[in-house]
Amino acid sequence: MGRVSETQLNNKKNIARASLSEKQVGRRNKKNLFFKSVIILGTLISTLPLLLILFYIFKQGISAINWNFLTHLPSPVGETGGGVSNALVGSIMILLVSAVIAIPVGIVAGIYLSEVKNSKLGYYCRLAVDVLQGIPSIVVGIIIYEWVVRPMGGFSALSGSVALALMMLPSIIKSTEETLKLLPESLKEASLALGVPYYKTILKVIVPTGISGISAGVILSIARVIGETAPLLFTAFGNPFMTTNILDPMSSLPLIIFNYATSPYDDWHQLAWGASMLLILMILILNIISKIVQRKWKVQF
Amino acid sequence: MESAILKATNFNASFGENHILKNINLEVHKNNVWAIMGPSGCGKTTFIRCVNRMHELAPNATAEGSLKLKGEEIYEMNPVMLRRKVGMVFQRPNPFPTMSIYDNVIAGYILNGIKLSKMEKDNIVETSLKQAALWREVRSTLYKKGGFLSGGQQQRLCIARALAMSPEILLLDEATSALDPISTSMIEELIHQLKSEYTILMVTHNMQQAARVSDKTAFFYLGELIEANNTKTIFTNPKHEKTQEYITGHFG
């Protein structure tokens, strides 16, 4: 091995020192600062619209919201007052039914996808989920109209729930799959090595351990479809009266916003703003709940 | 001579084309501690994973030949029933994170849906934890989740969990390799005590550990069982050249 001579080392040091003058360092610092400010500016710009939207909707909607707004039916044209109780109940009913349909199917499919790594069915299922996620909601509406509304002979809340369930599925499947994939293989082995059958291992060990991620995913998927309007136009249709029969047409918050906002009456516009604010509040609350669930139920290894 | 509790005759195992275990013949007698040694990739872990048929969980895994537990062919038994008779402790501690310490110990019963009275449960939990030398440390926190335990404590919890099922054989797959020296020595001490009631097969990379704890040693090399004998004989007077080289640190 050749020794590095003293002079060679000194030369190297000198070159290294000379190549970074004071001036250059100053310039670098300036570039750094510039880059940092661009990033912070970009971040601000992307959060600003959300804050503005929230501010505007609250400003417009807050005056509409009172006890009557939540408990009364819409009033006929010409009369002041009235509320959106039918839409509020309708939204909750439609979402509950769609959750009942989508959650079991979605979680089961998610478990399957997390368990099989290389199978044909798994590959096509993943592909289908990705495509399903990208289908425009109005197309889902038309399809459900053809498949459910027409055969059943009329608009119904149930058909609306089916449409929303279809839209919830991809995100439930994805979040379940991703959550369960992150669990260590050793957990499954621990259970199997105790002589626990495979299905019990999945149901009693794997799913409970991933429950925080799965439920957060489910809640977010509900928050995602709560404001869907297009599919409901073809299915739940809307109803000026209170109903809890899921085979009847039913009102919902997005439908009422759509109908009132496109009407020529100022009173109804006011109701639409109120309903918008209610909707946004519900989405906000669902998001916060999902965060809490994720944190509170998180399993520590 | 009493009959062997575990007996392998011309036993082979492979992953697809990859032939891992070649013609293994081994007899394990009751209340012996066997150390399974050998360089990486020699099939030690595969061998003990065949004993509770965890081997076949890997894709393309196959096994041939005869492997008998108390005279019963392992590969003809129901794997679920078999695994209740063969306890296993893994390289990394893996207690169930959703369960309390108490539930972890009787997890084998809970998860299998076996109903026990409160007294039976208490009894099993206490004896298993005592056997695993963990009782004194967790007595006051039995109903807390195990996440706060140290690695060594978690591993002893896993041992207690395996012991709670009263297995015929206990398999330890490098159970101390992820632990600090103090926890390791506690677990070695534990193995000494468990010997009177259980038969133990332990995979280890640590030759001192094999020499300290085991009665018998099996030396695997490239999928073959090169030598199996009393630990003393293996370490002082190995018959096979490869064994000697491994023990003296020439390879591995």
Image (spheres, grey):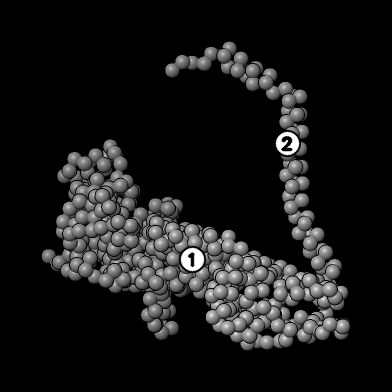
Q: Is residue B124 left or right of residue A238?
A: left
Q: Which mark is residue A285?
A: none
Task: Please give the name of the residue rendered at 82% of the width and 68% of the height, measured from the top-left corner.
Answer: A58
Q: Earlier in the sequence, mark 2 or mark 1?
A: 2
Expressed as whole percent of the image width and height from the top left, the position of residue A84 reads 76, 80
Which amino acid lies under the numbered mark 1 shown in the image of this protein? Answer: Gly
**Judging from the image, what secondary structure is the residue with disc 2 in?**
helix
Expressed as whole percent of the image width and height from the top left, the position of residue B201 reads 28, 59
Which amino acid lies under the numbered mark 2 shown in the image of this protein? Answer: Asn
Q: Which residue is mark 1?
A: A110
**Judging from the image, what secondary structure is the residue with disc 1 in?**
helix
Q: Which mark is residue A32?
A: 2
Q: Residues within 10 Å of mark 2 (few under 14, many from 20)?
A: few
Closest to the observer, B36 or B122? B36
Is the same chain shared between marks 2 and 1?
yes
Question: Is residue B185 depicted above or below A188 in this figure?
Answer: above
Expressed as whole percent of the image width and height from the top left, the position of residue A136 reads 61, 63
